[in-house]
Image (cartoon, rainbow, N blue to C red):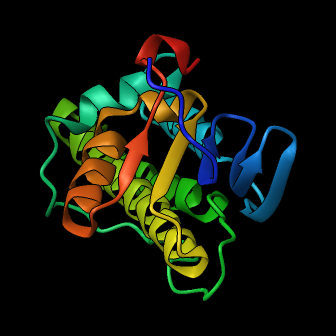
Amino acid sequence: AKPPAFPFIALLVSGGHTQLMRVEGVGKYELLGETLDDAAGEAFDKSAKLLGLGYPGGPAISRMAEFGDPTAYKLPRPMLHSGNLEFSFSGLKTAVLTLVKQHAASNLCEQDKANIARAFVDAIVEVLVAKCLKALKETGMKRLVIAGGVGANKQLRAALEAAATRQRLEVLYPEPGLCT
């Protein structure tokens, strides 16, 4: 509804891509960082499958995470302190698999699923937000545009909005229905 003014930092976050770009104008993009393996949306989908949730996994795991205890599990924050703007989410997916396997003998109850979902969503959101803030700081920009299916994620949006308020940044997203 409100087209962004150039220049800005763009986070393209979907099942196929996780990229941070500096956008100076139409067709004028500079790649600042991208995933080295699984895209964020792919990690959402695969982790949701491990938890026995539906496809697409992003909305399902996000809903389940709302009922999870944020202190039940702590999953890794891949490349959070790498010093660059690259991403890696395959290890996070493996950490979810490890938790699921630890519960295999006793089966996962709904609360365990919710707790694992919460740990997963918290980890991925923390990494995405931190990398976006780093890109903005490094470029001196104050405007962030989110694109892609994971851009509809309510936890990501809430975390970005909180960071934007604290740091006086502008964050723009398409309406959720246009993210996929």
Q: Position of residue 45 (x, y in %)?
A: 57, 32
| Of 60 and 153, the residue lying toward us | 153
The quadrant of the image that shows the C terminus is top right
Residue at (46% x, 52% y) in the render: 101
Q: Is residue 21 left or right of residue 119?
A: right
Image location of residue 18, percent across then percent down? 68, 49
Where is 114 relative to 152, above or below?
below
Instruction: Write the residue at 43% across / 69% down.
Output: 130
Q: Quadrant of the N terminus?
A: top left
Q: Residue furthest top?
A: 177
Residue 52 seen by the camera: no
Residue 61 in view: yes
Q: Is residue 145 left or right of residue 22?
A: left
116, above or below 49, in the image? below
The front one of 108 and 150 is 150
x 75%, y 36%: residue: 16
Q: Residue 152 location, x and y as percent?
A: 43, 27
Residue at 53%, 60% in the rendered image: 92
The residue at the far right in this view is 27
Give the quadrant of residue 156.
top left
Number of numbered callouts drawn: 0
* Residue 54 at x, y percent in the picture: 47, 16
